[in-house]
Image (spheres, grey):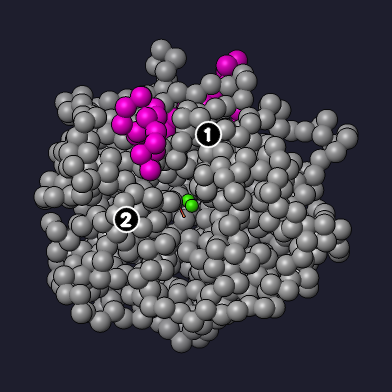
């Protein structure tokens, strides 16, 4: 997520500007730990693969390939060079096509997309949403159903009907709310071309106005009660749906991330509670102006409405009549994705990142067990939420967020999760984005996208952010991928060992820690890892949402991209480069795994792209396949 549109601030910048000033802390100790690239390449105690040493912090990272190992590479494609073209570039022998774009009608009687206005409220409600992000494909009775998040919108393109790109009336707000949420569509390859099956009974839009049940420990709590819902049991809508998850019982998990940016206050003198501040709720929204047409977005009139957002929502994509369920047991924060594992003992484990500078990494463990062929529909209803504590010696521990440990009730932990995690001393992270679990071993990866505040100032809760452990670089503009192995290969175990799979960086510009780890070179370098997903072979697909200026520290890195990493060797190769000013995010495979689907989100967010059709830039899901039709993942 990176919004550049005017007059909006970037999503990650906005909260900082509106947040009360915090004292800038000089982490001299952290700075001392920064050593030269040559220094940490000299190695140290080995943990997993090659280990590096930075000051007192020992950690491992992927090693570079050489000689025989390189010949045995499992990454059997010719690496794509970094570029700044306004198109998608894939390796020789591969091809791509657009599967669906923002505004495409899901039904044959719906209006066609209008590229001069961006459509109306009515057209958007029957069309593919904007800014597609995380996704999953479900095979159902021989048919394929794609569920895909529609995270947010760029005002200038969504409101192309307005000269200033700002919503001006209730229909603009209706369109904006309908552009968010989730699109569920049947897809098929017809005459060699992937597309939406129009009028399929599975086609459905879930928007910021769709009713859904609040479940779990927060259901019915006083903090969730509003004028419109005095029982605190039914929320209206979901938005800023970022990453996703997919359960073994066939449901889709959509993750509410920057939900705060849609609330504002008509009373600019309204005092903000500490909890509002921790979650970035302020007097001003981020330009969406939903309060203009819907009073529930005015916190001076509905101060508890924001407490009903920031959750994981479970959806049955095969039943268009099923009500989505907000699973409050999985906590409330700026959810990135939800990586689901069934542990060897049958408990369901969900790994969850909170994407904000200095926030935390979480794990949910279900109370009940998964039963093959049984009724698993409410496994996410009840369980224990844990938060990660990383030690410098490559060990770590999951700390349970219980009433005993936090002094908060189960409902309060579910609603004010960040506060609970701060109370138990969790490790502040460099913006945890996607988590991905290796299908071939008990090993889990998380993209820590970047954090310019590392070692500079505390998080919004006042927790310090020293450059230690898996977050070793001050003013970290490049990001890294941490991985951990649960003790005894048990995803429910309290302890784990960790190392770094890669430190992104730019070895063409820097010769210190910002050059990256030894599996980064001038050819495969990138910044800001974000989307992560394993394929069936155990290869890790890495997507970026970073700085595409191609200048200064980012010179030579080009547009946002997708790479593939081999967890066993540390090798990383660039597979794809996206069009100008986009991010690459979300991934899924067709049932036969000959096609990979990914999201190209917000091409031309600064106005400099005409992808994919040569006109108004449109976020799109693309389908990538091999020219010989072989399996690609
Ligand atoms: Fe929506 Fe953290 O990315
Ligand atoms: Ca991101
Ligand atoms: Ca992301």
Q: Is residue 508 left or right of residue 267?
A: right
Few, some or many residues within 10 Å of mark 2 (<14, 14–19, 20+): some
Image quadrant assignment for residue 621: top left
Foreground: 132 or 248?
A: 132
Q: Quadrant of the C terminus?
A: top right
Residue at 80% over, 64% down: 53
Secondary element at tag 1: loop
Span highlighted in magenta in the image: 604-633
Residue at 72% over, 59% down: 513
Image quadrant assignment for residue 40: bottom right
Residue at the extreme top? 191
**Residue placed under numbered mark 2 in the picture:** 8
Q: Which mark, by number, is residue 84?
A: 1
Residue 459 visible, this angle: yes
Q: Which mark, by number, is residue 574?
A: none
Q: Is residue 160 left or right of residue 239?
A: left
Residue at 50% over, 74% down: 459
Residue at 42% over, 18% down: 193
- Residue 257 in picture, x, y percent from top left: 40, 58
Q: Are discs 1 and 2 less than 8 Å apart at CB?
A: no
Secondary element at tag 2: loop
Residue 109 to residue 347: above or below: above
Foreground: 510 or 33?
A: 510
Q: Is mark 1 within 8 Å of ligand 2?
A: no
């Amino acid at each position: 997520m990176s919004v550049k549109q005017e007059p909006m601030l970037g999503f990650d910048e906005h909260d900082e500007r509106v947040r009360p000033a915090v004292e800038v802390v000089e982490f001299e100790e952290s700075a001392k730990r920064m050593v030269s690239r040559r220094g940490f390449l000299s190695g140290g105690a080995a943990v997993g693969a090659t280990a590096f040493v930075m000051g007192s912090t020992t950690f491992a990272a992927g090693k570079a390939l050489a000689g025989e190992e390189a010949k045995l590479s499992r990454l059997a494609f010719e690496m794509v060079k970094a570029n700044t073209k306004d198109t998608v570039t894939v390796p020789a022998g591969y091809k791509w096509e657009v599967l669906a774009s923002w505004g495409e009608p899901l039904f044959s009687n719906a209006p066609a997309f209008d590229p001069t206005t961006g459509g109306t409220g009515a057209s958007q409600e029957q069309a593919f949403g904007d800014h597609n992000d995380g996704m999953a494909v479900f095979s159902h009775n021989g048919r394929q159903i794609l569920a895909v998040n529609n995270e947010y919108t760029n005002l200038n393109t969504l409101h192309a009907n307005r000269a200033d790109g700002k919503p001006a009336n209730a229909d603009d707000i209706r369109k904006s709310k309908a552009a968010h949420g989730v699109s569920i569509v049947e897809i098929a390859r017809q005459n060699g071309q992937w597309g939406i099956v129009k009028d399929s009974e599975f086609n459905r839009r879930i928007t910021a106005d769709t009713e859904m049940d609040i479940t779990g420990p927060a259901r019915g709590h006083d903090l969730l009660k509003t004028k419109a819902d005095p029982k605190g049991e039914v929320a209206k809508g979901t938005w800023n749906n970022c990453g996703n998850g997919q359960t073994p019982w066939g449901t889709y998990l959509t993750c509410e991330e920057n939900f705060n940016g849609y609330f504002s206050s008509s009373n600019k003198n309204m005092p903000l509670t500490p909890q509002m501040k921790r979650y970035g709720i302020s007097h001003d929204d981020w330009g969406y102006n939903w309060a203009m047409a819907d009073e529930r977005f005015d916190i001076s009139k509905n101060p508890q409405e924001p407490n009903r957002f920031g959750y994981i929502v479970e959806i049955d994509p095969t039943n268009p009549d099923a009500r989505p369920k907000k699973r409050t047991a999985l906590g409330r924060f700026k959810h990135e994705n939800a990586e689901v594992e069934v542990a060897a003992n049958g408990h369901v484990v969900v790994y969850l990142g909170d994407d904000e500078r200095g926030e935390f990494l979480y794990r949910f463990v279900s109370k009940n067990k998964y039963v093959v062929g049984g009724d698993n529909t409410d496994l996410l209803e009840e369980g224990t939420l844990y938060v990660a504590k990383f030690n410098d010696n490559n060990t770590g521990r999951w700390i349970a967020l219980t009433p005993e440990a936090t002094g908060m009730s189960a409902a309060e932990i579910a609603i004010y999760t960040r506060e609970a995690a701060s109370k138990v001393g969790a490790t502040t992270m460099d913006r945890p984005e996607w988590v991905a679990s290796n299908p071939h071993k008990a090993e889990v990866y998380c993209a820590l996208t970047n954090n310019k505040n590392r070692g500079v100032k505390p998080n919004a809760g006042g927790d310090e952010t020293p450059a230690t452990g898996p977050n070793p670089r001050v003013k970290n503009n490049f990001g890294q991928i941490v991985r951990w192995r649960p003790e005894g290969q048990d995803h429910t175990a309290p302890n784990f060992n960790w190392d770094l799979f890669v430190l992104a960086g730019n070895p063409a510009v820097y010769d210190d820690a910002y050059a990256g780890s030894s599996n980064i070179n001038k050819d495969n370098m990138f910044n800001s890892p974000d989307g992560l997903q394993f394929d069936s072979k155990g290869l890790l697909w890495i997507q970026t949402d970073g700085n595409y200026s191609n200048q200064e520290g980012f010179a030579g890195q080009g547009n946002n991209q997708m790479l593939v990493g081999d967890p066993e060797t540390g090798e990383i190769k660039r597979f794809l480069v996206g069009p100008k000013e986009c991010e690459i995010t979300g991934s899924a495979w067709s049932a036969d795994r000959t096609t990979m689907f990914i999201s190209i989100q917000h091409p031309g967010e600064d106005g400099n792209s005409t992808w994919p059709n040569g006109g108004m830039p449109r976020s799109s899901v693309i389908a990538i396949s091999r020219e010989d039709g072989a399996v690609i993942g």
